[in-house]
Image: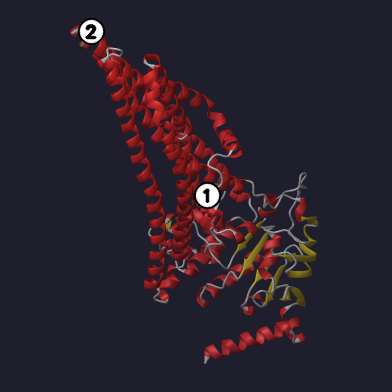
Amino acid sequence: MADLNIEDEILGKAYDAKLMKRLLSYVKPYTKYVVIAILMNVVVAALGPLRPYLTKIAIDDYIVNSDYDGLILISVLLLGTLVFQAFVQYFLTYFTQLMGQKIIYDLRVKLFSHVQKLALKYFDKTPIGRLVTRVTNDVESLNELFSSGIVMIFSDVFIIIWILVFMLFMSWQLTLVSLSVLPILFYATFLFRKKVREAYRDVRFQLARLNSYMQEHVYGMNIIQIFSKEKDEESKFAEINAAHRKANIDSIFYYAIFYPIVEILSSLAVALIIWYGGGNVIQSNMTIGVLFAFIQYTEMFFRPIRDLSEKYNIMQTAMASSERIFKLLDNDTFINDPNTPKRLKKFEGSVEFKNVWFAYNSDDYVLRDISFKVNAGETVAIVGATGAGKSSIINLLNRFYDVNKGEILVDGVNLKEITKETLRQYISIVLQDIYLFSGTIKSNINLGDSSITDEQIIKAAKTVGAHDFISKLPKQYDEEVKEKGATLSVGQKQLISFARALAFEPQILILDEATSSIDTESELLIQKAIQELLKGRTSIVIAHRLSTIQNSDKIIVLHKGEIKEVGTHQQLLNKKGIYYKLYQLQYKDQEILKT
């Protein structure tokens, strides 16, 4: 578990100039929003400190002199500043949130687009939960930075500047007295940042553990329930959840210490003002209005300092999140298209492997010197024990991976000389592991491709025998499909995936254990249709059930990544080699089942 989340432990700097520069590149298209927000921040920041100064005028010029008319005027002016500040604050919040949402939208789209372009070998080693966290939680952390972090920092800074301007204008001596507690505050802030940084690291790590555990065990809920492991897993989850709770409580502890310290220092500053300023008022060296205004300014001064501490936490979160996001965006695990791709004028569908070697990891080859040819319109079956390399051949043909040595030709053209999109538009594949998306049966067959008509969808479904069960559903082809097709049987999902492959009318059809999840009755129903469909198409069939491939034009027998036998069903039986042994084993198993 720790290995899976080691990336989430990395915290980085609280502020990284390089990361910030990259983040600001996403702000550039919305520069006008930033300018408007900063200008409004200047106004809002000035309106707050203006009120204590107006209060000072009200006391010294009107209350002391019993000027009732002047007091009414200054009161209306104070009310006006409050209303105007609320008005500007509304638009400030609107523009900053709008900017934040637009930036987050752009970033999420870019992330999702990038993830879709990554090669499958990246997903082989990367937990899905981590990628989901990048596109959701980490991007949302940046939303806080853009909408209430960067721009609002300006607000806090401007407020402090305006307060200092007004305070120095009225009395520089009392200003120095007010700020005498700042060294203690700066030291407390330094310790707070250090401790919160450590606590935050632990919170992020524990959250990653929690997310990973939840995802893994919800996905495998059927196994948990089958083996009655609910209580055991609940106990383990409680331990992880407790560690997450403790990490959060630890982080809250430092806030619980820091904020009271700020309040104490604020009160100490007020006490010093009353002591020093009050003495000056008694000696008639200062007006009561100035003293009253300074008390208000001191209370106002510490509020943005508290806010800046919170902004530091937002910045810390955003820097850590952006580091992980850019690490994903910088990942170049791609299957690259050629700079000048060749165009296939007419796709016939011949496939040829020439001395192909392939390994998923370094030199641990799963395919060794594989050479064979499938002529256009031929049906070729590939058989072999589990781990022989059958699915690897399919992965290479679809160019999900690139060969280590040798080459693969389609219509005499190397796969690396044409684009992946061009190649894959001519290929359809039915996998053993069926995956259906949330949506409708129709959308799962045409995958949202509007060029595939309803008539084509129904025709494909009828051909594979899926139309019968679909037509009995309440909404037929518009029937809702839940996540991973939870409301459908395994056989029904397999038939839908088969209809999906045929709806795209491929020149090359690949069946990877396509009938493994279909019962005998359903298999008999579609076998005749499959034979008709394979005519005129180049077809590659991977199957454990040797009875399903007896009519293939050619059968290739793989063993430990090497081609051991090639021939028709009868030719391979006559050789009495590996294929013969596999057939005998299955024949005996069927005889046992019959008895």
Residue nearer the viewer, 552 or 595: 595
| Camera-nearest residue between 547 and 387 | 387
Return the residue found at the far bottom.
595
**Residue to which mark 1 is pinned:** 134
Q: Amino acid at mark 1?
A: Arg
Picture disc at residue 278? none
Q: Say if residue 184 shows up in the picture.
A: yes
Q: Are marks 1 and 2 in contact (CB under 8 Å)?
A: no
Judge left or right: residue 426 versus residue 470.
Answer: right
| Quarter of the rendering containing residue 123 | bottom right
Q: Considering the numbered disc 2 on the image, is that residue within a helix, a strand or a loop?
A: helix
> Residue at position x 46%, y 21% from top?
39
The residue singled out by tag 2 in the image is 70
In the rendered structure, the answer to whether residue 260 lies left or right of residue 491 reads: left
Amino acid bearing label 2? Gly
Q: What scheme was used to colour the molecule?
A: secondary structure
Q: Quadrant of residue 172?
A: top left
Q: Is residue 564 left or right of residue 429?
A: right
